Image (tube, rainbow, N blue to C red):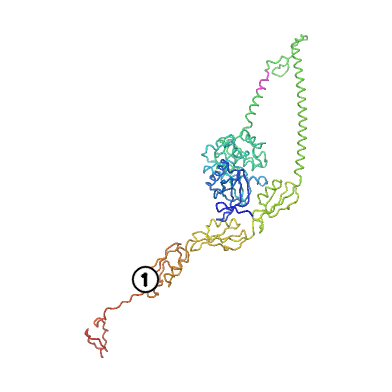
Amino acid sequence: MSEERILNGRYVVEELIGRGGMADVHLGVDQVLGRKVAIKLLRGEMAREPMVQARFRREAKAVAGLNHPNIVSVFDTGEEERLVSGTTVQLPFIVMEYVRGRTLRDLVKAGDMTSDLAITYVLGVLDALSHSHSMGIVHRDIKPANIMVTDRGALKVMDFGIARALADSSSTMTQTQTVVGTAQYLSPEQARGETVDARTDLYSTGCLLYELFTGRPPFIGDSPVSVAYQHVGEHAPPPSSLVPELDPIFDPVVLKALAKDREDRFIDAAAFSTALRNAQQGIAMHPEELTAPLPYSAADATNQATAAAMVSHAAIPASDMSPAAQQDHTGHMEPLDVPRHFEEPPMWEQHLQRERDEHRARSRRTWTVVVSVVFVLALAVGGLFFYNWMQAEAERNAPVTIPSLVDTSQAKAESTLADLELRSDVENVFDDDIQSGHVVETEPAASKEVRKGTTVHLMVSKGPEAMVIPESLAGQSEAGARQVLRDMGFEIGSVTRVNHPSIPTDWLVDTEPKLGSKVTVGETIDLVLSTGKVEMPQLYNLTYDEAKKAIDGMGARLSITMEKGVNEAAEPGTVFKQEPESGSSIEQGDTVTITIAEEPVETTPSEEPSPTDTPTPPATESDPPSETPTPTEEASPSTP
């Protein structure tokens, strides 16, 4: 078993899920937040290419500054030390948001694209470009393969690997003689090596919209160079001419985005978006906004001018015609005055006439040969075309064996079927053994032979039907807990708050169902968050040590102060007063004040009170007055 690969002591690198021109993309797991991520790693053979490394780091820098729901987020970057061909090199990597879904290229190939979906997706792309342009970033490589549609229908723009800042004047098509961008979606200014700006992305988005509408790019050629020439010098046919069912109201919007001169395009992504929304609602573009493409190229104009000149020079004035060919204004021929006898033409004129006749004969023979050759070639080409068509039909109708796709990722399975010219549709099912996102089984089953173009039903696992809510979520932030639960397939319900002595405000205390319980995937989980407060305990009749132990044992980081006071009803050395009162809610870290009862102080008299100080009871009729004793005498009861 291979050793587990961990980056920055945090990210576990798992299986390969994608591959580009300079980097590989792996599925990964963030051990700190417990969530899936996509890790883009520069390939080892590219480590010694400074330009490639600069482009890789530029992608991380460009996307890290963008925060938009339609742009794939970058969470972290770093470098990994690897041994490549006996040399230790630093390979940069980017940790990105993990997006599960299909690219627009896959949707077009599968035939799952409609005009309404095309408009929705392009509006999402324009929204993302509007944000990136406002941040000064030009993408420069907008194409169907760089646009992802998630399983929930959200749109994500990816791969800012050749993005540049608007202020970078060197942002042209080429860098060190290397073509930047994809030929089918390359703007004329990129093809000419000129400086790019935000309108360059709008041209590529116009190419994207054209392909989503028609199923093909606006220009197709045998090589990238020929396609680039078409972007510079030719005009694409209106989309509705290729797809008759498409409303022609969209043609001006697409063709304006594809204008050769960037000044004739939409001023920004918002203007493009507004025009597209208006067309969707049946509002045509204003005539002043239209950009009419030239009906023919400059070469065609030159050829037509030359032909016109030739026709003009071939015209013969009527005055130069022979009398036998002249007519009056009514169109009737005048009688000719031709002598009955005339002299034979001179020899030189006869010789010239013979040469003319021979020239005409040779021309007729030449044209006969040319027509014959063309006819033979046409027959040969027709025969070759028919033979190739028969071969293609035989190959198209040849049976295809369905491969074994069990435990293969959904993206790889769909790519494999597409390479075999088979269609695919997906059904998500629960499975306890096959990991989420991998194929459980196919219908028809593996080893069955089917015709090309057959739809193969893929049952894709969405994980176990029931999963255990991790107890490690306790004490995490609300956002982190929500992300983990959503990645596990749960819905998030209501939020309640309770006091807790140690968990900070709005961090997770528990869930309902409880943490650690096993819950069916798709169920709603309610969150119980901390208020950041703690309930004051009962401290009455406790000693100071006992009260401090009770406070410290709560783990709420509460401070305690002591005061002393007299309370005859309380036992000395115990608490008879506390502030705040028990049962009240206080903030974590607040101060608690307790008052400890002291022994009451007894007053001892310095001398006995004298008889004069003793109050004399009031006299009654039955009690005669008595004499007051002197201070030296002891008072005695009087005798009645």
**Residue nearest the observer in this picture, 604 or 480:** 604
| Direction from residue 599 to residue 404 in the image, left or right | right
Query: Could you tell me residue 528's position as x and y percent?
Result: 53, 61
Our reading of the magenta stretch's main secondary structure is helix
Task: State the residue at coordinates (75%, 16%).
Answer: 355
Residue positioned 75% across, 17% down in the render: 356
Pinpoint residue 450: horizontal percent, then vertical percent.
75, 49
Residue denoted by label 1: 565
Q: Is residue 417 visible?
A: yes
Residue at x 39% of width, y 75% of height: 569
| Quarter placement of the C terminus | bottom left
- Image coords of residue 491 (percent x, y): 59, 58
- Viewer-closest of 451 and 58: 58
Q: In which quarter of the image is the N terminus?
A: bottom right
Q: Quadrant of residue 43?
A: top right
How many labels sit on residues? 1
* Residue 357 sits above or below residue 268 on the image: above
Q: Nearer the viewer, residue 633 or 529?
A: 633
Indicate the position of residue 555 as horizontal and vertical percent values. Answer: 48, 64
Task: Please name the residue shown 38% across and 72% down the image.
Answer: 597
**Is 17 included in the stretch rendered in magenta?**
no
Q: Is residue 150 above or below residue 464?
A: above
Q: What stretch is highlighted in magenta?
A: 309-316
Query: Quick one: which residue is furthest to the bottom in this view?
Result: 640
The amino acid type found where label 1 is placed reads Gly
Identify the secondary structure beneath mark 1: strand
